[in-house]
Image (cartoon, helix red, strand yellow):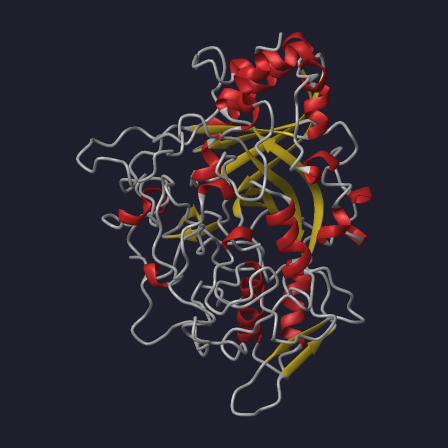
């Protein structure tokens, strides 16, 4: 999914270096635009208790995911406590959403006059599956334990795979690394600013896992921003393997610590991503010290078949220009310019400022805009993942809000940059990361099940019965179809024979405990 990853937007000044632009100042944060984002309620988000990647994009160039199986439960609980004991010399510490990011534009609650603080060289976060909570012996030690609003989390990713289209090659029987087999208990995710920091903190973590038989590492995988050569030097980019600039559409949270350019969408309520008492569609897990300020996330490893994707574009060049088709499939040109604003070219006259790349609507409250998909097909990937004001399943009013189904994605690619001169190099490429939400059922599973893999997601706009998301949908080449409407009564372009361009290699439904919750677990003895 091309949503909510760290990404470079076109239109930025060419001279700004990647490391100053990405890892020094957050280009999505706009100084002065803070009135609607300030903590105005009597119940602000407790940034010091919430895991950082729920609310912040770290903008670090590399990541390593460790999948752990609980060894000796008491030792495992004790080690988790060391990750939040405030003693960096003892163990690397879980990163919270406090103002740790340094050199970025000030956030809504920051004083612009304050001197910049040093950005850390790593960030660490933790997810626990339901089987992990059981293996940690939480259930028998906490009689009042209840996740009654979160049946999907309890069932686990493998049990729910068919609901989100993880079938065929994506079926859990093919998942790697022990995912879905019962021993996938804890995911520890380490972001780093450099390979030296990655090695150093990884070595510390591995040694800690083994202490007292706390955990067994059963799998690990690395992600890294894709590289390209600029001025003779390799630098990271903000692209995914299909060639698109990623992460332009960011999910704004009311009262959150980061702010983004306007996008015609109301900010999301914080309870959609942080477990809070004011939530409208779930009960916070019990006991409260375990549930409050936590969240849920779906970890996924997804292989992307770039060769198959590029070959499909070329196979239809007699019907539509391959680059235009790539834009129609995604909803944006590969450089990030949206079809909704520039349907004919990826280089509109006068250019397009970075802050304007997400400032559009598909269907306005009066029904105007692009309701039939003449600019951006209704069935395009981006329009399915975030329909904005398009009346869809789950929201039937033009110009309405689809916020209750929004997701936050934190991820990075794995594998080297695709080289079109050597397409059949046998190297696997894909994406690693988390889809963060407070309700896996109502957000992640709803989006994948209804909007991505259902033809009737778009209300009054009738798509062919076998229509799926052309980029990430689960496709049968014998039945698949993607329709591109044409203006002025010209018959639509109907493309068939789409294959699944992505394959799920691993998945886990994780609880993201607060700092308080981790201490609670550690203190169970």
Quadrant of res 47: top left
Quadrant of res 87: top left
Which residue lies most toward the bottom here? 489
Residue at image point 62% right, 7% down = 525
In this rendering, the answer to whether 326 lies above or below 59 is below
In this rendering, the answer to whether 459 lies above or below 60 is below
Total numbered circles = 0
Q: Which of 146 and 525 is in front in this view?
A: 146
- Looking at the rendered image, the quarter that the N terminus falls into is bottom right
Instruction: Give coordinates of residue 279: x percent, y percent.
Output: 51, 40
From the viewer's perspective, is 46 left or right of 240? left
Q: Is residue 217 visible?
A: no
Instruction: Give coordinates of residue 272: x percent, y percent.
Output: 51, 44
In this rendering, the answer to whether 313 lies above or below 156 is below
Instruction: Give coordinates of residue 94: x percent, y percent.
Output: 48, 24
Q: Is residue 518 visible?
A: yes
Instruction: Give coordinates of residue 207: x percent, y percent.
Output: 59, 14
Q: Nearer the viewer, residue 53 or 451?
A: 451
Residue at image point 70% right, 70% down = 467
Quadrant of res 494: bottom right
From the viewer's perspective, is 261 left or right of 151? left
From the viewer's perspective, is 221 left or right of 249? right
In this rendering, the answer to whether 232 lies above or below 146 is below
Q: Which of 209 and 489 is in front in this view?
A: 489
From the viewer's perspective, is 215 left or right of 169? left
């Amino acid at each position: 999914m091309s949503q909510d990853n760290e990404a470079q937007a076109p239109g930025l000044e060419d001279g700004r270096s990647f490391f100053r632009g990405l890892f020094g100042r957050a280009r999505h944060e706009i100084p002065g635009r803070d009135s609607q984002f300030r903590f105005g309620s009597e119940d602000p988000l407790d940034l010091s208790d919430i895991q950082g990647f729920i609310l912040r994009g770290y903008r670090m160039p590399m990541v390593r995911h460790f999948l752990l199986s609980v060894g000796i439960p008491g030792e495992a609980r004790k080690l988790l406590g060391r990750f939040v004991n405030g003693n960096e010399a003892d163990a690397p510490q879980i990163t919270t959403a406090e103002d740790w990011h340094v050199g970025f534009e000030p956030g809504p609650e920051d004083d612009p006059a304050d001197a910049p603080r040093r950005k850390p060289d790593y960030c660490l976060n933790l997810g626990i599956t339901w089987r992990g909570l059981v293996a940690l012996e939480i259930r028998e030690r906490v009689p009042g334990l209840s996740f009654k609003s979160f049946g999907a989390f309890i069932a686990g990713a493998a049990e729910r795979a068919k609901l989100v289209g993880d079938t065929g090659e994506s079926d859990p029987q093919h998942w790697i690394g022990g995912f879905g087999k019962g021993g996938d208990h804890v995911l520890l995710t380490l972001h780093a600013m450099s390979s030296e920091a990655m090695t150093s903190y990884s070595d510390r973590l591995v040694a800690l896992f083994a202490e007292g038989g706390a955990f067994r590492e059963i799998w690990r995988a690395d992600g890294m921003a894709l590289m390209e050569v600029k001025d003779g030097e390799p630098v990271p980019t903000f692209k995914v393997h299909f060639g698109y600039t990623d992460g332009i559409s960011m999910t704004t949270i009311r009262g959150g610590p980061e702010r983004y350019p306007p996008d015609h969408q109301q900010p999301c309520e914080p309870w959609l991503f942080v477990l809070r008492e004011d939530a409208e569609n779930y009960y916070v897990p019990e006991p409260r010290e375990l549930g409050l300020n936590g969240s849920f996330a779906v970890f996924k490893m997804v292989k992307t078949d770039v060769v198959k994707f590029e070959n499909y574009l070329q196979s239809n060049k007699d019907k539509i220009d391959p680059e235009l088709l790539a834009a129609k499939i995604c909803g944006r040109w590969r450089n990030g310019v949206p079809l909704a604003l520039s349907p004919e070219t990826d280089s509109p006259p006068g250019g397009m400022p970075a802050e304007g790349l997400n400032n559009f609507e598909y269907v306005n409250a009066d029904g105007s805009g692009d309701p039939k998909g003449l600019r951006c097909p209704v069935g395009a990937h981006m329009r399915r993942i975030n329909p904005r004001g398009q009346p869809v399943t789950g929201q039937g009013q033009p110009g309405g809000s689809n916020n209750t189904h929004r997701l936050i994605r934190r991820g990075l690619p794995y594998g080297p940059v695709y080289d079109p001169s050597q397409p059949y190099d046998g190297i696997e490429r894909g994406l690693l990361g988390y889809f963060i939400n407070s309700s896996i059922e109502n957000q992640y599973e709803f989006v994948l099940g209804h909007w991505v893999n259902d033809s009737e997601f778009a209300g009054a706009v009738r798509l062919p019965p076998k229509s799926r998301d052309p980029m990430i949908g689960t496709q049968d080449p014998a039945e698949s179809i993607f329709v591109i409407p044409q203006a002025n009564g010209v018959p639509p372009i109907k493309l068939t024979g789409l294959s699944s361009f992505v394959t799920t290699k691993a998945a886990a439904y994780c609880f993201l405990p607060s700092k308080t919750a981790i201490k609670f677990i550690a203190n169970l003895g």
